[in-house]
Amino acid sequence: MKAVMHTRHGGPSTLELRELPDPEPGPGEVLIAVRAAGVNRLDLLQRQGPGVLPGFSLPHIPGMDISGDIIGLGPGVNGRHIGDRVVVNPGVACGTCAQCTIGQDAYCSHVQIIGGNRPGGYAELVVVPATHTHVLPPGTSHVAAAALPTAYGMAWQALVVRGELRADETVLVHGGGSGVSMAAVHIARRIGARVIVTSGSDEKLAHMAQIGAHATINNRTEDVAARARELTDGTGVDLVLDHVGPALFQASLHSLRLRGRLVFCGDTTGATAAFHLPHAFHCGITLLGAGSCGFADFGAMIDFCFGDGGGIEGELEPVVDTLLPLAEAAVAHHRLESGETKGKIVLLPGNAAIRSSGQRTNPVARASKSTPAVSSSAASTASVSSIGRRIAGAIDERPRAIDERPPTAPPQPESAATPKVPTHS
């Protein structure tokens, strides 16, 4: 198979397209032909070095967000079939540590992350646990599916699991233009909440308004807290989602109503935040950390995105910034590092790709339920409006995990372990 890997830390030029042996599925695993792989900031951080995740080692194949077709079954696999079109849950808990045994698998101390500390989706083939695949409803494009796992998983954990966002509440979302922020807008609107988005770029704010933000605030030219209160008739917002870090932490606190909630899940602007304690405790502010999705939470997120989700706000449409062939992974990393993205960057292994050059690409365009599935190869030439399906529907065809319980990570066969670098390029 062809795969993009890096054998050393450094810039995007360290990413190399290699020919590697095809992996073989072990017990409880499936072999997937990767059709689309999303690019994430973790891919950049671990390429730059040192590795962020425990267990990371070189050489490494990145790629946590994977959608593709099952082409091989390992021993003991039930509930999945050759030809199933699936999206992958990248977090594989051990199932035996203290946290896993009490149902807190999101905090597993021995977690494996597909594309993080085991081979990922920057490849034509990948092996994953069958339990961590979710079947795509007919007509859902692989590109749309690959835009979901990390960004939507994080937004779901922050807004729904930890923040407990409800209909008719107002949420303030920082970092407009990022994948997490776009996912947050879609999820919050579908719940029935009002969404205010901040960014330092008027261009990004206009884009966020286009995809569903009810109001926007430029955090470089406006007083975020004052503007948030103005937009809520002086009350303040119910919830803040902050994945930016210390730069807006104090402003977030002052934007909240009495007994408001601040959910934080990122440190882009630094690892240490300082804030005024008396304001926080006198106003009864709740601070909530949000990490990765557990097995059940990930399944609920996928069900919400691909089913009707119980929401009241129309369609949920992942936004894709750029589509590129696998061989141009370095270009993808350069673009993500530029800070100019407006949505997800997606690699298409084995296929030519549209270069959207920063323009919005909507892979889940409005269509009838009869719209046929669009393969990733067809996505390279199909018009954007033809790629996708109507997500709010097909309830009986919603993707389901094979087992509702967090499964134990299967043993790693030698072929599925971190690949050995061949002596030739």
Image (tube, rainbow, N blue to C red):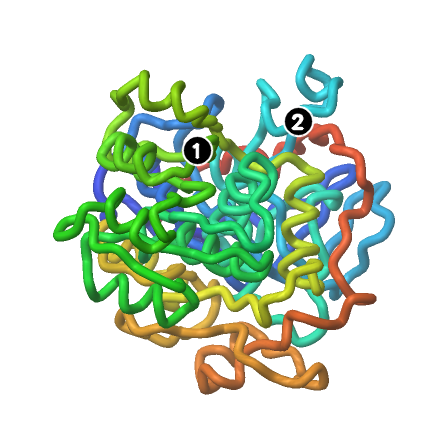
Foreground residue among 325 and 396: 396
Nearest-to-viewer mark from 1 and 2? 1
* 251 displayed left or right of 350: left
* 415 displayed left or right of 6: right
Q: CA distance from mark 1 to mark 2?
A: 33 Å
Q: Earlier in the sequence, mark 1 or mark 2?
A: 2
Residue 313 visible here: yes
Q: Is residue 70 above or below residue 133?
A: below
Find residue 52 and report its horizontal and vertical position in percent.
38, 27
Give the quadrant of residue 269: top left
Residue 324 visible here: no
Name the residue at 49% across, 78% down.
Answer: 379
Find residue 224 and report its horizontal and vertical position in percent.
24, 46
* 49 displayed left or right of 146: left
Q: Is residue 261 above or below residue 340?
A: above
Badge 2 marks a residue whose secondary structure is helix
- Tell me the amino acid under the disc marked 1: Leu
Instruction: Check disc 2 and report the residue beneath it.
Output: 105
Name the residue at 20% across, 49% down.
Answer: 219
Name the residue at 36% across, 72% down.
Answer: 210
